[in-house]
Amino acid sequence: MATTAQLRAALAVLRADTDAAAQQAGISEMSGTDAAGVEHALLAGLLYRMMGDDLRRALTGAPDLTALEERARAAGPGAAKYASDDPSRREEHCAQAHFEAYWLADRIAGLHFTTAPPAAALQAAAHTAEATRTLLRIHRDLLRGAGPDAGAAAWAGVIEQLDRARALADRAAAEAAARARSAPGPQSVVGVAVRNTECRTP
């Protein structure tokens, strides 16, 4: 694990505004009982977000499909890299996937609460992300030797989340279809041709 000093050095090179990040996180309002741990998490989280944004731009900026596939292969470890019979390695990989699912759920929540009115598609995505987190937690518990009935209550929660997600996805699809039916065609009702100004890529 990187030290706090190493994280600060990396963020300084990237000219990251750590003070703004601390203010946004409300660090000054926290208890202060774990100041060192909170600072480390703040810096690691900021670097994680910045690197994630950088990787996204590197992938979406690929000039063609071949470049995209090669950049993605270079960026990701690939399924073969994760294949392992070592229980501790498998548990570690599961823990990382669970964390990334948590991060995804947090991102979706941020989108959801900044959208008014709430979009059904985002609500469905939030339920799906929560179901994914729970499934990964069940899998982790099974890797640790939990009995097959240990996650019975969790399974019920997964099914409930997926049922909600499906209902919301159906609703979102119906709303999209209704908007498509009511959208004006390429020509106006008075018979004057309307030029389509949609930006299209080659």
Image (cartoon, rainbow, N blue to C red):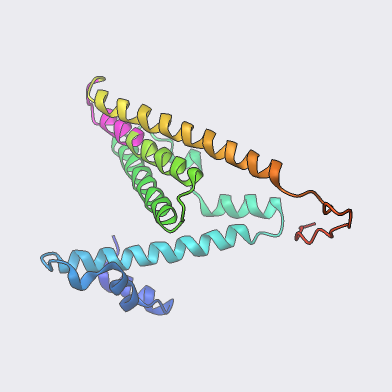
Q: Which residues are magenta?
A: 135-147
Q: Is residue 194 left or right of residue 140?
A: right
Vertical arrangement, residue 190 with respect to residue 148, above or below:
below
Name of the residue lying farthest toward the left: 33
Dominant secondary structure (helix, strand or loop) of the stretch shown in magenta: helix
Q: Quadrant of the N terminus?
A: bottom left
Position of 153 compared to 191: left or right? left
Image height check: is 143 above or below 101?
Answer: above
Q: Position of residue 159 (x, y in %)?
A: 37, 27
Give the tally of numbered discs.
0
Q: Which image quarter: residue 142?
A: top left
Q: Residue at x 82, y 54 (%)?
A: 188
Q: Residue furthest front?
A: 190
x and y percentages locating residue 118 in the rendered image: 45, 50
Q: Is residue 12 left or right of residue 195?
A: left
What x and y, as percent, mark residue 37? 19, 64
Q: Quadrant of the C terminus?
A: bottom right
33 or 186: which is nearer to us? Answer: 186
Residue at 22 percent across and 21 percent down: it is 147
Magenta stretch holds residue 137? yes
On screen, residue 32 above or below 55: below
Q: In the image shown, does 192 or 142 lie closer to the viewer?
A: 192
User: Residue at 56% across / 53% down in the picture?
Assistant: 74
- Residue 73 within the segment the image draws in magenta: no
Vertical placement of residue 128 versus 110, above or below: above
Q: Is residue 57 left or right of residue 15?
A: right
Could you say where residue 46 lies in the image, as x and y percent from the top left? 36, 67
